[in-house]
Image (tube, rainbow, N blue to C red):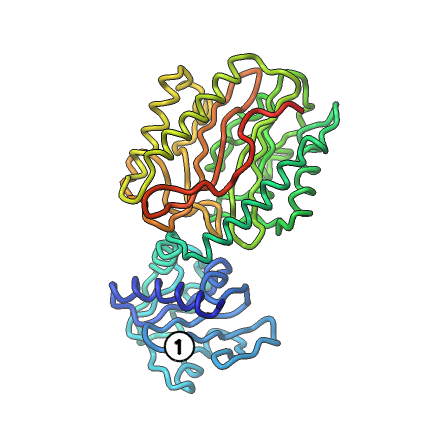
Amino acid sequence: MLQSELKLRRDKIRALMAQQEIDAAIITCNVNLVYTCGRVVSGYFYLPLQQPARLFVKRPNDLKGEFVAPIRKPEQLPDLLEEQGLPLPKRLMLEGDELPFREYNRLAACFPGSEVLPCGTELIRRARSVKTEMEVEVFRRSAAAHARAYAQIPSVYRPGMTDRQLSVEIERLMRQEGCLGIFRVFGRSMEIFMGSVLAGDNAAAPSPYDFALGGEGIDPSLPGGANGTTLQAGQSVMVDLGGNFFGYMCDMSRVYSIGRLPQKAYDAHQACLEAQAEVTALARPGITCEALYNKAVEVVAKAGFADNFMGIGQKAKFVGHGIGLEINEAPVLAPRIRQELEPGMVFALEPKIVLPGVGPVGIENSWAVTADGVEKLTVAPEEIIEL
Protein backbone atom coordinates (compact mmCIF):
# COMPACT_ATOMS: atom_id res chain seq x y z
CA MET A 1 0.00 0.00 0.00
CA LEU A 2 2.83 2.39 0.84
CA GLN A 3 4.51 1.80 -2.51
CA SER A 4 1.33 2.62 -4.43
CA GLU A 5 0.93 5.75 -2.30
CA LEU A 6 4.50 6.85 -3.02
CA LYS A 7 4.00 6.22 -6.75
CA LEU A 8 0.90 8.43 -6.63
CA ARG A 9 2.93 11.24 -5.08
CA ARG A 10 5.77 10.84 -7.56
CA ASP A 11 3.34 10.88 -10.46
CA LYS A 12 1.93 14.19 -9.19
CA ILE A 13 5.44 15.62 -9.45
CA ARG A 14 5.98 13.99 -12.84
CA ALA A 15 2.79 15.61 -14.19
CA LEU A 16 4.15 19.04 -13.25
CA MET A 17 7.56 18.16 -14.69
CA ALA A 18 5.94 17.16 -18.00
CA GLN A 19 4.27 20.56 -18.27
CA GLN A 20 7.73 22.16 -18.26
CA GLU A 21 9.38 19.45 -20.39
CA ILE A 22 11.67 18.40 -17.55
CA ASP A 23 13.26 14.98 -18.08
CA ALA A 24 14.31 14.20 -14.51
CA ALA A 25 14.70 15.55 -10.99
CA ILE A 26 17.27 14.96 -8.27
CA ILE A 27 15.74 15.16 -4.81
CA THR A 28 17.96 15.30 -1.76
CA CYS A 29 16.24 17.50 0.88
CA ASN A 30 14.75 15.63 3.84
CA VAL A 31 11.10 16.68 3.57
CA ASN A 32 10.96 15.98 -0.16
CA LEU A 33 12.62 12.61 0.40
CA VAL A 34 9.95 11.68 2.94
CA TYR A 35 7.29 12.72 0.43
CA THR A 36 8.70 10.78 -2.52
CA CYS A 37 10.37 7.71 -1.00
CA GLY A 38 8.88 7.51 2.47
CA ARG A 39 11.94 8.15 4.61
CA VAL A 40 14.96 10.35 5.24
CA VAL A 41 18.29 9.21 3.80
CA SER A 42 21.60 10.82 3.05
CA GLY A 43 21.77 10.51 -0.69
CA TYR A 44 19.99 11.29 -3.94
CA PHE A 45 16.57 10.30 -5.19
CA TYR A 46 16.57 10.33 -9.00
CA LEU A 47 13.10 10.79 -10.47
CA PRO A 48 12.98 10.41 -14.26
CA LEU A 49 9.87 11.41 -16.17
CA GLN A 50 9.22 7.97 -17.66
CA GLN A 51 11.38 5.26 -16.02
CA PRO A 52 11.20 3.99 -12.41
CA ALA A 53 12.83 6.18 -9.78
CA ARG A 54 16.23 5.30 -8.31
CA LEU A 55 17.54 5.88 -4.80
CA PHE A 56 21.30 6.34 -4.40
CA VAL A 57 22.21 6.12 -0.72
CA LYS A 58 25.23 7.20 1.29
CA ARG A 59 23.70 6.54 4.72
CA PRO A 60 22.24 4.30 6.12
CA ASN A 61 24.25 1.63 4.34
CA ASP A 62 21.82 -1.25 4.93
CA LEU A 63 19.05 -0.27 2.52
CA LYS A 64 18.28 -2.85 -0.15
CA GLY A 65 15.94 -2.95 -3.11
CA GLU A 66 15.61 -3.31 -6.85
CA PHE A 67 16.13 0.39 -7.47
CA VAL A 68 18.44 1.15 -4.53
CA ALA A 69 22.20 1.52 -4.99
CA PRO A 70 25.07 2.78 -2.81
CA ILE A 71 26.90 6.00 -3.66
CA ARG A 72 29.82 7.91 -2.15
CA LYS A 73 29.63 11.25 -3.94
CA PRO A 74 27.34 12.97 -6.46
CA GLU A 75 29.97 12.82 -9.23
CA GLN A 76 29.17 9.11 -9.52
CA LEU A 77 25.56 9.79 -10.56
CA PRO A 78 26.02 9.98 -14.38
CA ASP A 79 27.96 6.71 -14.54
CA LEU A 80 25.50 4.94 -12.22
CA LEU A 81 22.56 6.09 -14.35
CA GLU A 82 24.22 4.89 -17.56
CA GLU A 83 25.04 1.53 -15.92
CA GLN A 84 21.32 1.12 -15.25
CA GLY A 85 20.44 1.92 -18.85
CA LEU A 86 19.04 5.40 -18.18
CA PRO A 87 19.72 8.27 -20.60
CA LEU A 88 21.17 11.42 -19.08
CA PRO A 89 18.52 14.16 -18.88
CA LYS A 90 18.43 17.07 -21.27
CA ARG A 91 16.54 19.15 -18.70
CA LEU A 92 17.26 18.40 -15.03
CA MET A 93 15.41 19.86 -12.03
CA LEU A 94 17.07 20.56 -8.66
CA GLU A 95 15.69 21.92 -5.37
CA GLY A 96 16.95 25.43 -6.01
CA ASP A 97 15.28 27.15 -3.04
CA GLU A 98 16.56 24.67 -0.46
CA LEU A 99 19.97 23.36 -1.47
CA PRO A 100 23.01 25.27 -0.22
CA PHE A 101 24.71 27.24 -3.01
CA ARG A 102 27.77 25.01 -3.02
CA GLU A 103 25.80 21.76 -3.10
CA TYR A 104 23.52 23.02 -5.86
CA ASN A 105 26.49 23.97 -8.04
CA ARG A 106 28.23 20.68 -7.33
CA LEU A 107 25.18 18.68 -8.43
CA ALA A 108 24.69 20.86 -11.49
CA ALA A 109 28.35 20.38 -12.49
CA CYS A 110 27.84 16.60 -12.53
CA PHE A 111 25.62 17.02 -15.60
CA PRO A 112 27.51 19.40 -17.93
CA GLY A 113 25.40 18.36 -20.92
CA SER A 114 22.09 19.08 -19.18
CA GLU A 115 20.10 22.25 -18.79
CA VAL A 116 19.78 22.49 -15.00
CA LEU A 117 16.67 24.19 -13.63
CA PRO A 118 16.33 25.44 -10.01
CA CYS A 119 12.53 25.10 -9.91
CA GLY A 120 12.37 21.83 -7.95
CA THR A 121 11.42 23.36 -4.60
CA GLU A 122 8.50 25.35 -6.02
CA LEU A 123 7.25 22.48 -8.15
CA ILE A 124 7.42 19.84 -5.41
CA ARG A 125 5.76 22.16 -2.88
CA ARG A 126 2.96 22.67 -5.41
CA ALA A 127 2.51 18.91 -5.68
CA ARG A 128 2.57 18.57 -1.88
CA SER A 129 -0.08 21.27 -1.40
CA VAL A 130 -2.86 18.88 -2.48
CA LYS A 131 -2.85 15.86 -0.18
CA THR A 132 -3.70 12.28 -1.08
CA GLU A 133 -6.42 10.36 0.76
CA MET A 134 -3.75 8.60 2.80
CA GLU A 135 -2.14 11.90 3.80
CA VAL A 136 -5.50 13.28 4.98
CA GLU A 137 -6.04 10.13 7.02
CA VAL A 138 -2.62 10.63 8.65
CA PHE A 139 -3.77 14.14 9.58
CA ARG A 140 -6.91 12.69 11.19
CA ARG A 141 -4.79 10.35 13.30
CA SER A 142 -2.44 13.19 14.25
CA ALA A 143 -5.35 15.43 15.19
CA ALA A 144 -6.77 12.77 17.52
CA ALA A 145 -3.43 12.37 19.32
CA HIS A 146 -3.05 16.15 19.48
CA ALA A 147 -6.48 16.49 21.10
CA ARG A 148 -5.69 13.77 23.64
CA ALA A 149 -2.58 15.64 24.76
CA TYR A 150 -4.37 18.99 25.05
CA ALA A 151 -7.16 17.40 27.11
CA GLN A 152 -4.58 16.66 29.82
CA ILE A 153 -3.20 20.21 30.07
CA PRO A 154 -5.28 21.22 33.14
CA SER A 155 -3.85 18.24 35.02
CA VAL A 156 -0.23 19.46 34.73
CA TYR A 157 -0.82 23.09 35.74
CA ARG A 158 0.43 24.14 39.17
CA PRO A 159 -0.01 27.62 40.73
CA GLY A 160 3.16 29.72 40.56
CA MET A 161 4.41 28.08 37.35
CA THR A 162 6.15 30.05 34.64
CA ASP A 163 5.07 29.77 31.03
CA ARG A 164 8.28 27.86 30.36
CA GLN A 165 7.56 25.30 33.06
CA LEU A 166 4.03 24.80 31.75
CA SER A 167 5.39 24.46 28.21
CA VAL A 168 7.79 21.73 29.32
CA GLU A 169 4.91 19.78 30.88
CA ILE A 170 2.77 20.13 27.76
CA GLU A 171 5.67 19.08 25.55
CA ARG A 172 5.96 15.96 27.73
CA LEU A 173 2.26 15.23 27.21
CA MET A 174 2.69 15.61 23.47
CA ARG A 175 5.69 13.27 23.43
CA GLN A 176 3.83 10.68 25.49
CA GLU A 177 1.06 10.69 22.87
CA GLY A 178 3.67 10.02 20.17
CA CYS A 179 4.74 13.46 18.97
CA LEU A 180 8.09 13.18 17.19
CA GLY A 181 9.28 16.52 18.58
CA ILE A 182 10.71 17.88 15.33
CA PHE A 183 8.85 20.98 14.14
CA ARG A 184 9.65 21.27 10.43
CA VAL A 185 9.40 24.75 8.92
CA PHE A 186 10.14 25.90 5.38
CA GLY A 187 12.54 28.81 5.01
CA ARG A 188 16.03 29.60 6.22
CA SER A 189 14.82 32.13 8.84
CA MET A 190 11.97 30.10 10.33
CA GLU A 191 12.69 28.02 13.42
CA ILE A 192 10.99 27.06 16.67
CA PHE A 193 11.02 24.19 19.16
CA MET A 194 7.75 22.19 19.00
CA GLY A 195 5.61 25.33 19.12
CA SER A 196 4.81 28.06 21.60
CA VAL A 197 3.08 28.71 24.91
CA LEU A 198 2.26 32.42 25.14
CA ALA A 199 1.06 34.01 28.37
CA GLY A 200 -0.06 37.56 29.07
CA ASP A 201 1.71 40.43 27.34
CA ASN A 202 4.42 38.15 25.95
CA ALA A 203 1.96 37.33 23.15
CA ALA A 204 2.39 40.91 21.87
CA ALA A 205 6.20 40.75 21.75
CA PRO A 206 7.37 41.18 18.13
CA SER A 207 9.32 38.30 16.66
CA PRO A 208 11.53 38.07 13.56
CA TYR A 209 9.71 34.89 12.59
CA ASP A 210 6.63 34.91 10.38
CA PHE A 211 4.30 33.26 12.89
CA ALA A 212 0.81 34.41 13.83
CA LEU A 213 2.01 35.57 17.26
CA GLY A 214 5.61 35.94 18.32
CA GLY A 215 6.71 35.89 21.91
CA GLU A 216 10.07 37.02 23.26
CA GLY A 217 11.55 33.61 23.90
CA ILE A 218 14.09 32.64 26.56
CA ASP A 219 17.18 33.83 24.70
CA PRO A 220 17.85 36.22 21.77
CA SER A 221 19.33 33.30 19.84
CA LEU A 222 15.81 31.82 19.56
CA PRO A 223 13.43 34.78 19.96
CA GLY A 224 9.99 33.18 19.98
CA GLY A 225 7.56 31.60 22.41
CA ALA A 226 7.65 31.40 26.21
CA ASN A 227 9.91 33.90 27.98
CA GLY A 228 9.74 32.85 31.63
CA THR A 229 6.62 34.84 32.54
CA THR A 230 5.15 33.79 35.88
CA LEU A 231 1.54 32.80 35.33
CA GLN A 232 -0.76 35.10 37.29
CA ALA A 233 -4.46 35.54 37.89
CA GLY A 234 -6.20 37.37 35.05
CA GLN A 235 -3.78 36.17 32.37
CA SER A 236 -4.64 34.11 29.34
CA VAL A 237 -2.35 31.35 28.08
CA MET A 238 -2.36 30.22 24.46
CA VAL A 239 -0.97 26.76 23.73
CA ASP A 240 0.11 26.37 20.09
CA LEU A 241 2.24 23.24 19.74
CA GLY A 242 2.72 21.49 16.42
CA GLY A 243 1.37 17.95 16.30
CA ASN A 244 4.03 16.09 14.36
CA PHE A 245 2.94 12.55 15.20
CA PHE A 246 3.53 10.83 11.85
CA GLY A 247 5.69 13.33 9.98
CA TYR A 248 2.78 15.63 9.16
CA MET A 249 2.42 18.93 11.02
CA CYS A 250 -1.07 19.08 12.49
CA ASP A 251 -1.74 22.56 13.96
CA MET A 252 -4.02 23.48 16.85
CA SER A 253 -4.21 26.34 19.38
CA ARG A 254 -6.31 26.46 22.53
CA VAL A 255 -6.64 29.14 25.21
CA TYR A 256 -6.51 28.64 28.97
CA SER A 257 -6.87 31.18 31.77
CA ILE A 258 -5.39 31.69 35.21
CA GLY A 259 -8.61 32.30 37.05
CA ARG A 260 -11.34 34.42 35.55
CA LEU A 261 -10.49 36.86 32.73
CA PRO A 262 -12.06 40.28 32.08
CA GLN A 263 -15.29 40.03 30.08
CA LYS A 264 -13.59 41.70 27.11
CA ALA A 265 -11.40 38.61 26.70
CA TYR A 266 -14.41 36.32 26.38
CA ASP A 267 -16.00 38.72 23.90
CA ALA A 268 -12.82 38.77 21.83
CA HIS A 269 -12.56 34.99 21.95
CA GLN A 270 -16.14 34.71 20.76
CA ALA A 271 -15.33 37.03 17.86
CA CYS A 272 -12.56 34.63 16.82
CA LEU A 273 -14.92 31.67 17.02
CA GLU A 274 -17.42 33.54 14.85
CA ALA A 275 -14.66 34.37 12.37
CA GLN A 276 -13.76 30.68 12.22
CA ALA A 277 -17.41 29.72 11.67
CA GLU A 278 -17.97 32.22 8.87
CA VAL A 279 -14.67 31.51 7.11
CA THR A 280 -15.21 27.75 7.14
CA ALA A 281 -18.80 28.13 5.98
CA LEU A 282 -17.42 30.04 2.98
CA ALA A 283 -14.46 27.71 2.37
CA ARG A 284 -14.87 25.29 -0.55
CA PRO A 285 -13.05 24.41 -3.78
CA GLY A 286 -12.78 27.47 -6.02
CA ILE A 287 -12.88 30.12 -3.27
CA THR A 288 -9.78 32.31 -3.13
CA CYS A 289 -7.50 32.58 -0.14
CA GLU A 290 -7.93 36.36 -0.23
CA ALA A 291 -11.71 36.04 0.13
CA LEU A 292 -11.32 33.89 3.25
CA TYR A 293 -8.85 36.33 4.80
CA ASN A 294 -11.15 39.26 4.09
CA LYS A 295 -14.08 37.46 5.70
CA ALA A 296 -12.11 36.90 8.93
CA VAL A 297 -11.07 40.57 9.05
CA GLU A 298 -14.66 41.65 8.41
CA VAL A 299 -16.06 39.57 11.28
CA VAL A 300 -13.43 40.67 13.80
CA ALA A 301 -13.71 44.33 12.78
CA LYS A 302 -17.49 44.22 13.18
CA ALA A 303 -16.97 42.94 16.73
CA GLY A 304 -14.67 45.91 17.47
CA PHE A 305 -11.32 44.11 17.71
CA ALA A 306 -9.62 45.11 14.46
CA ASP A 307 -6.75 46.89 16.24
CA ASN A 308 -5.88 43.76 18.20
CA PHE A 309 -6.35 41.17 15.46
CA MET A 310 -3.30 38.97 14.72
CA GLY A 311 -1.12 41.05 17.03
CA ILE A 312 -0.87 44.63 18.23
CA GLY A 313 2.27 46.57 17.28
CA GLN A 314 3.45 43.92 14.83
CA LYS A 315 0.64 42.07 13.09
CA ALA A 316 0.70 38.83 11.16
CA LYS A 317 -0.38 39.39 7.57
CA PHE A 318 -2.34 36.16 7.27
CA VAL A 319 -5.09 34.29 9.08
CA GLY A 320 -4.31 30.76 7.91
CA HIS A 321 -1.72 28.63 6.15
CA GLY A 322 -1.32 25.28 4.49
CA ILE A 323 0.16 22.46 6.55
CA GLY A 324 1.79 19.19 5.64
CA LEU A 325 5.27 17.79 6.12
CA GLU A 326 6.12 21.39 7.03
CA ILE A 327 4.08 23.77 9.13
CA ASN A 328 4.00 26.47 6.42
CA GLU A 329 2.84 25.12 3.08
CA ALA A 330 0.43 26.35 0.43
CA PRO A 331 -2.20 27.72 0.45
CA VAL A 332 -1.79 30.91 2.50
CA LEU A 333 -4.92 32.76 3.60
CA ALA A 334 -3.71 36.32 3.13
CA PRO A 335 -4.53 39.50 1.23
CA ARG A 336 -3.72 39.50 -2.50
CA ILE A 337 -3.38 35.70 -2.52
CA ARG A 338 -5.78 34.67 -5.27
CA GLN A 339 -4.92 30.99 -5.20
CA GLU A 340 -8.11 28.93 -5.08
CA LEU A 341 -8.77 26.09 -2.66
CA GLU A 342 -8.70 22.59 -4.13
CA PRO A 343 -10.03 19.30 -2.75
CA GLY A 344 -7.27 17.65 -0.73
CA MET A 345 -5.66 20.85 0.52
CA VAL A 346 -5.16 20.97 4.28
CA PHE A 347 -4.81 24.27 6.11
CA ALA A 348 -4.73 25.74 9.61
CA LEU A 349 -7.11 28.64 10.30
CA GLU A 350 -6.04 30.78 13.26
CA PRO A 351 -7.98 33.97 14.00
CA LYS A 352 -6.34 35.38 17.14
CA ILE A 353 -6.62 38.58 19.19
CA VAL A 354 -4.13 40.00 21.71
CA LEU A 355 -5.41 42.11 24.61
CA PRO A 356 -2.89 44.24 26.55
CA GLY A 357 -2.70 43.27 30.20
CA VAL A 358 -4.54 40.00 29.55
CA GLY A 359 -2.89 38.12 26.70
CA PRO A 360 -3.95 36.13 23.64
CA VAL A 361 -7.34 34.66 22.85
CA GLY A 362 -8.63 32.94 19.74
CA ILE A 363 -8.64 29.59 18.07
CA GLU A 364 -6.67 27.47 15.63
CA ASN A 365 -7.84 24.30 13.96
CA SER A 366 -6.68 22.17 11.04
CA TRP A 367 -9.10 21.71 8.13
CA ALA A 368 -9.15 19.46 5.06
CA VAL A 369 -10.80 20.75 1.88
CA THR A 370 -13.44 18.33 0.60
CA ALA A 371 -15.41 18.26 -2.66
CA ASP A 372 -17.97 20.75 -1.35
CA GLY A 373 -16.58 22.33 1.82
CA VAL A 374 -14.12 21.59 4.62
CA GLU A 375 -13.68 18.94 7.31
CA LYS A 376 -12.50 19.92 10.79
CA LEU A 377 -9.62 17.64 11.77
CA THR A 378 -8.73 18.95 15.26
CA VAL A 379 -11.83 18.26 17.32
CA ALA A 380 -11.46 19.49 20.91
CA PRO A 381 -13.24 21.96 23.23
CA GLU A 382 -12.86 25.52 21.95
CA GLU A 383 -13.93 27.63 24.91
CA ILE A 384 -11.42 29.30 27.24
CA ILE A 385 -10.60 26.69 29.89
CA GLU A 386 -9.85 27.94 33.38
CA LEU A 387 -6.80 26.38 35.02
Residue 236: image x %, image y %?
59, 22
Measuring 49% from the left and 81% from the top, which residue is drawn there?
A: 66
Measuring 59% from the left and 39% from the top, which residue is drawn there?
A: 222
The answer to whether 239 is drawn above or below residue 172 in the figure is above
Residue 374 shows in the view = yes
Measuring 39% from the left and 77% from the top, which residue is drawn there?
A: 52
Residue 92: image x %, image y %?
33, 69
Q: Is residue 125 left or right of residue 255?
A: left
Choose top left, top right, bottom left or bottom right for residue 294.
top left
Q: Amino acid at mark 1?
A: Pro
Residue 11: image x %, image y %?
35, 66
Residue 106 shows in the view = no
Measuring 30% from the left and 62% from the top, which residue is drawn there?
A: 16
Q: Is residue 241 left or right of residue 91?
A: right
Residue 85: image x %, image y %?
38, 86
In the picture, the quarter occupied by the C terminus is top right
Give the farthest residue toward the front. Answer: 372
Q: Nearer the viewer, residue 67 or 138?
A: 138
The answer to whether 261 is drawn above or below residue 55 in the figure is above
